[in-house]
Amino acid sequence: MPFDKPRILLVDDEKDILYVLQKGLELKGFHVDGFADPIEAAAQFAPFRYDIVISDIRMPQMTGFDLYRMLRKQDNRFKIFFLTAFEVHEQEVKLAFPNLPLNSFIHKPIGIDDLVRLIETPKQRQ
């Protein structure tokens, strides 16, 4: 059964943030699979199942960048967003991920309505 909203994989090791974002997005009509452990998220990942991946960058077991690289090898079509409470250095990101739109970074804290606006915005072209 198709969903009329994108299907989201959400990964954040901070369980309270994970819970609030997951429940908020579900209330907005999204189907969200949430994981506090990026290794478990990678193990449960199914290619072409998700339209959007939202991942924290700094996690103890694996960074969000490492998770992104791992998932991208299996599926090259999902839209990615990284959650961060820290400053993002544009030049470093461009070197590591030359095709990644700079609007792929979401600064914490973020309200659900603002998050929905970001994820529903078409990809920025390079």
Image (cartoon, helix red, strand yellow):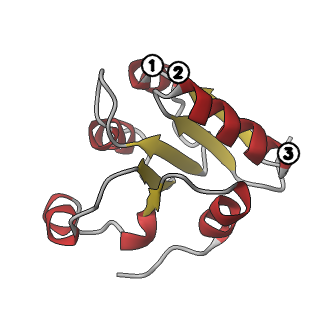
Q: Count neighbours of disc 2 (C-alpha within 10 A) and say few if under 14, some if 14 to 19, many if 20 or more.
A: few
Separation (CA) of disc 2 from disc 3? 23 Å
SS assignment at label 1: helix
Quarter the C terminus occupies:
bottom left
Which of these two is toward me, 105 or 126?
Answer: 105
The answer to whether marks 2 and 1 mark residues whose Cβ atoms lie closer than 8 Å is yes
The x and y percentages for residue 23 are 76, 37
Residue 97 located left or right of residue 112: left
Pointer 3 residue: 27
Image height of 111 relative to 10, above or below: below
SS assignment at label 3: helix
The answer to whether marks 3 and 1 mark residues whose Cβ atoms lie closer than 8 Å is no
Pointer 2 residue: 44
Q: Count neighbours of disc 3 (C-alpha within 10 A) and say few if under 14, some if 14 to 19, many if 20 or more.
A: few
Residue found at the very far bottom of the displayed protein: 125
The x and y percentages for residue 5 are 78, 55
Q: Amino acid at mark 2?
A: Gln
Which of these two is toward me, 38 or 72?
Answer: 38
Separation (CA) of disc 2 from disc 1? 4 Å
Quadrant in the rendering for residue 55 = top left
Image height of 110 relative to 16, above or below: below
Pointer 1 residue: 43
Which of pointers 3 and 1 indicates the residue nearer the eye? 3
Identify the residue at horizontal 50%, vertical 34% (top origin). 11
Q: Amino acid at mark 1?
A: Ala
Q: Amino acid at mark 3?
A: Leu
